[in-house]
Amino acid sequence: MPAPPQESLFAVCIPGLEPFVFRELEDLGLIRQAEPNTPGPPPSGRSGSIERGGILFSGTLEDLYTANLMLRCASRVLIRMPAFHAAAFSELRRKAGRLPWERFLSKGHAVALRVTCRRSRLYHSTAVAQRVAAAIQDRLGFCLFQRKWDEEAAQDGLQLILVRLVHDVCTISVDASGALLHRRGYRQATAKAPLRETLACAMLSASQWDKAAPLVDPFCGSGTLPIEAALWSRGIAPGAFRRFSFMNWPVFEPDRFKKLQGSFKAEPPASPPLILASDRDRGAIRMARENAQRCHMAAFIHFSARPFSAIQPPPGPGWMVSNPPFGVRIGRRETLSNLYGRLGGVLKEKCPGWRVTLLVSNPHRLTETGLSFDKKLRVRHGGRWVQIACGRV
Ligand SMILES: C[S@@+](CC[C@H](N)C(=O)[O-])C[C@H]1O[C@@H](n2cnc3c(N)ncnc32)[C@H](O)[C@@H]1O
């Protein structure tokens, strides 16, 4: 049987999360790990390259299904079609019309085009979108509905197409995910300032939590960190509770996908970790519990409403991974220094020897804890740069 064709795939992520997605792709076997101590890129075949905002790699349609189903830190996965030169509308329409649209679109499909133009002769994004839509219809021979893309309300069945013109080179990508991948499907209730599930997973990954030792989040809000930790420790696919755009494509093979889902069946861990999640806000705890119920994780997380100073961590080494208030959207700025200072004190008293990973918007907050942090990573969150900081109590 001939080998299935390789597609050019791009796993998009929040800026700063590229190394985490790269690692995940390696762990899933979708890109080959570089030999230790070997300089340069990994051997040919399954190589991947880090670009700003994502990882470019090649793979089959089945690899694309796996990436959508299993990546915990990526925001979406795209198929990148071959780039072409386009400096005039006629050239754009002719060349875009040669792309294999029939693989992704069928009669009745609605499309949304998102266009960016930089340093190109074609700079009017609305006009570019019109020509690409016309090119798709030239190729398919029927009309398509066009709608506006709304990230917050990505409707099922709406196919997002991304068009980028840079220096007169046009790259068109077809989105395979639909709603952003952090929308796992279980979090319908959110407390104040929720964390994206993808960023929560990056924090867990940065913390090097072993998925067996106790994990505590004393500022759990709607429960994102403890729920993602519970799902991860049980090997449950982050995409197990949702649909993807590729399921509407004419080339989608449902049986192959079902088989693939079966191959990732979760195994309950031999010694399930103790996960403690608390917040002083009772309403947040109620929401967190409901969210955990929706993905069947409520039985594996101990939720309680209490201030962080009243946490009761188990003895022995463990991990605290948490997202305390930034003071931008919640809390009062003047009390924040106090809160971080007290947090350091509580950790020293109740969690000696524990590892701690915090998400902070202002590095000064780390100093206020009086703890030392040896690893700091910058990532985008809520339109600003923040830090994932890891240390030991
Ligand atoms: C940035 S939010 C956490 C968001 C959470 N990671 C999520 O995804 O929903 C900070 C949380 O800290 C809680 N909080 C503020 N002060 C607290 C305190 N003294 N003790 C415990 N929780 C507190 C707030 O109620 C809020 O839910």
Image (cartoon, grey):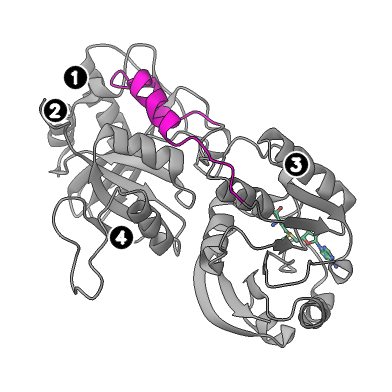
- Across and down, in percent, residue 360 comes to 64, 72
**In this figure, which residue is indicated by the disc labeled 4?**
51
Residue 53 visible in this rendered orientation of the protein:
no
Are the residues at dot 4 and dot 3 in contact (C-beta closer than 8 Å)? no
What is the secondary structure assignment of the residue under circle 2?
Answer: loop
Q: Earlier in the sequence, mark 4 or mark 2?
A: 4
Are the residues at dot 1 and dot 4 in contact (C-beta closer than 8 Å)? no
Between the C-alphas of marks 2 and 3, the distance is 53 Å
Are the residues at dot 3 and dot 1 in contact (C-beta closer than 8 Å)? no
Q: Is residue 375 left or right of residue 333?
A: left
Label 2 CA crowd tier, 10 Å (few <14, some 14–19, many 20+): few
Q: Is residue 272 magenta?
A: no
- Which picture quadrant has residue 393? bottom right
**In this figure, which residue is indicated by the disc labeled 2?**
98
- Residue at 27%, 60% (x, y): give it: 33
What is the secondary structure assignment of the residue under circle 1?
Answer: helix
Q: Earlier in the sequence, mark 4 or mark 3?
A: 4
Between the C-alphas of marks 2 and 1, the distance is 7 Å
**In this figure, which residue is indicated by the disc labeled 1?**
139
- Residue at 11%, 25% (x, y): give it: 1
Between the C-alphas of marks 4 and 3, the distance is 40 Å
Residue 347 visible in this rendered orientation of the protein:
yes
Q: Is residue 225 left or right of residue 40?
A: right
Q: Which mark is residue 193?
A: none
**In this figure, which residue is indicated by the disc labeled 3?**
299
Label 1 CA crowd tier, 10 Å (few <14, some 14–19, many 20+): some
> What's the magenta region?
242-270
Are the residues at dot 2 and dot 1 in contact (C-beta closer than 8 Å)? yes
